[in-house]
Image (cartoon, grey):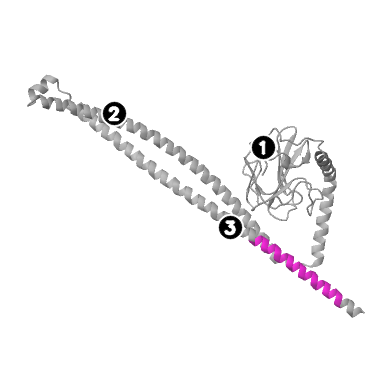
Amino acid sequence: TALEKKIAADEAAKKKKQEEQARLATQLAEIDTQIQGVQGKLTETQTGISQIEAEIAGSENAIRTKEAELVKERDDQAETLRNIYEQGSPSTLELLVAADSLSDVLAYHDYLDAVEGKIEQQITEIDELKAALEARKADLEKQRNELQRLEGQQQAYRQALGGQRTERNHLLANAKSSEEKIAAQIAESQKVYSDVNNELTKLMEEAKRKAAQRARGEIPKGVSNIGFQWPTSFKYISTNFGGQTPFQSFHTGLDLPNYAGTEIVASADGVVNYIGQLTYGYGNFVVISHNARFATLYGHCQSFAQGITVGQTISRGDLVCYMGTTGWSTGPHLHFEIREYGVPVDPRDYLPNL
């Protein structure tokens, strides 16, 4: 009957809303966990900054103390030399006439020898003190550089924390969105994905073909002559090369999840070839060319390293960007690709073993 159909429709709508609320609760719990993790990172970096600031303050105090000692030693040395110059050095005959005994003459000469020895010792100590001060100042400069690096890292974590809190508030504010709006958003995302996927189809098909050849042993594995390194610290590999994701039927790289704001570095020496900022796909990403054969891609970045530009020469281990969840992403991670002659290949074949 019509009543039974209405009841069934209401029950279906109620169940769908409950499922929606459960998904929202899961998302909020995940974001709360991420916020707690980033807050922990902020505490760690603040502790490191406080320690280095204390060490810098101690080093500066030690340098000021040593410099004061150096000035005093120089003043004492100058005073001793001035007294000897003003008093003059009597001849041995004059000493014999004026002295009560030969032992007084010998004692005077011993005194002069002692003064000369003390001056020489002071000169040696001053030279050693100068060398120690220079070394201390060099260490101090290294500590200041480390402090600057930690402050930059802390800023990245703060930025990530702000983004996560904004996302959390956004989810709470939109918890009562209608099913029609969600469906429209899904349809729009699927349309955008379809448009982009049409352009990537040939690339993924070629990557599949290469993977199949490699599995049959037709293409030797080995390690590239560039010497790739892992580009970031990560908790685990969430998606391997060739796997499936909500956005790709054939995954063209490795997904390496960690806290938002984690540093991402160049996997090998090269030149920055492209810096992109998209609202879909890779999101914020960087491409580095290493030679005519290899290039690497770093996707879903939260933000880029300060001063990084297209055409810039970069060394392995240099900071490239910070981990985020821009573009088509379900959480903070790095999407890392190695491309051989423009075609994505399995990065595990060129990276050190875990």
Instruction: Work out which quarter of the rendered image holds the N terminus and state it.
Output: bottom right
- Residue drawn at (73%, 53%) of the image: 329
Q: Provide the major secondary structure of the magenta segment.
A: helix
Near-viewer residue (179 or 93): 93
Distance from disc 2 to disc 1, alpha carbons, whole Å, reads 55 Å
**Residue at position x 72%, y 65% from top?**
24
Q: Which residue is mark 3?
A: 39
Q: Which residue is mark 2?
A: 120
**Disc assigned to residue 268:** 1
Q: How far separated are the C-alphas under marks 2 and 3?
A: 58 Å
Q: Residue at x 42, y 44 (%)?
A: 59
Quadrant in the picture for residue 136: top left
Hey, what amino acid is under mark 1? Ala
Residue 202 percent location from the top left of the image = 85, 43
The answer to whether residue 10 is magenta is yes
Label 2: which secondary element: helix
* Direction from residue 73 to residue 324 in the image, left or right: right
**In x, y percent, where is residue 104?**
11, 27
Residue at the extreme top of the image, as rendered: 93
Residue 176 in sight in this render = no
Q: Earlier in the sequence, mark 2 or mark 3?
A: 3
Region of the chain picked out in magenta, as a range:
7-32
Which is more toward the observer, 245 or 2? 245
Q: Amino acid at mark 3?
A: Gln
Residue drawn at (55%, 48%), measured in percent from left and top? 150
